[in-house]
Amino acid sequence: MHDSVAVALKQKKQSSMYRALEMHRAGEVDGFISAGNTGAVMALSTLLLGRLPGVDRPSIGTFLPSEKGPVLLIDAGANVDSKPSHLMQFGVMGSVYTELILGRTSPKVGLLNVGEEEKKGNDASIAAWPLLKEAPVNFVGNVEGRDILKGTVDVVVCDGFTGNIILKFAESFPGLLKSKFYEYAERGFFHKIWAGLMGKTIKGMIRDWDYQEYGGVPLLGVQGVSIIGHGSSTPRAMSNMIRRAKEMVDKGVNDTIRNAMAPPQSS
């Protein structure tokens, strides 16, 4: 876990991660999952599997809960700096993934920004707006941070720097909820009774935020199925990672992304 990406690429060619991805490239297996070093998984997956045509930067997509069901956040950490064209590609890949995995027809795609107006935001966001507007997705414009948990859109597009901060913040929420719940229960006898009655409800709410439920996050844009798991993945999380990889294979996520990224045919 402490090896640099360069070491993983050049000096660890007999590692399980490297060997498994070689098997995937050779067609011996249909998918790859790992709870190892995230940077190494991304680098090795991109190097050994290659990128899908039309994809400049593979991207991580992760589901977050909202008032209206899961919302896909993309990019969640693969690319710290993203060009406008990268953000457009994230939107296309995220739209395909959400439609196939969640079964949502023409999912709404929003660009994360500091305001809803078209000309708001930094240079990359302003330049990405018209690209997403012309992309083969249901782009509804800019969305703000508060729109994520509201479920205003199905796919939230952002650079990996912003997305990873949001993801890590979201992962801390269940711990805060548990802490406040136990703190309330300790205030007195009747508080403990109420806490006991509400225990199952609270657990159900927290489950929506539990990374184990989704298992891992896909690295979208590579020519294969690469699922990245949490470093502290439990057996249940690993099992769900396998299910997610199989689901991507069965539903032809990569083939659909390849078609969506293909340039339009001239008449």
Image (cartoon, helix red, strand yellow):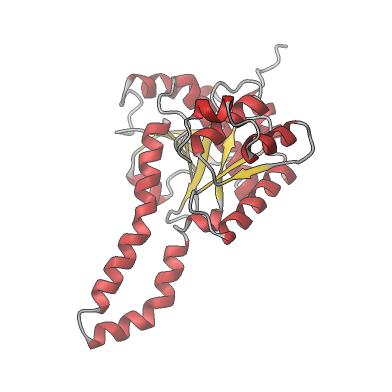
Residue lying furthest top: 267
Quadrant of residue 8 within the rendered picture:
top right
Q: Is 137 drawn above or below residue 154 in the view shown?
A: above
Of residues 102 and 20, the one drawn nearer to the viewer in this rendering: 20
Quadrant of residue 2 within the rendered picture:
top left
Of residues 22 and 102, the one drawn nearer to the viewer in this rendering: 22
Residue at x 33% of width, y 46% of height: 146
Does residue 134 appear to the left or right of 200 in the view shown? right
Of residues 235 and 118, the one drawn nearer to the viewer in this rendering: 235
Q: Position of residue 251 (x, y in %)?
A: 72, 44
Q: Using the rendered image of the protein, determine whether residue 51 is visible from the camera's viewpoint.
A: no
Q: Position of residue 247 (x, y in %)?
A: 69, 48
Does residue 220 appear to the left or right of 171 in the view shown? right
The C terminus - image quarter: top right
Q: Position of residue 214 (x, y in %)?
A: 55, 53
Residue at x 50% of width, y 52% of height: 70
Residue lying furthest left: 187
Quadrant of residue 258 within the rendered picture:
top right
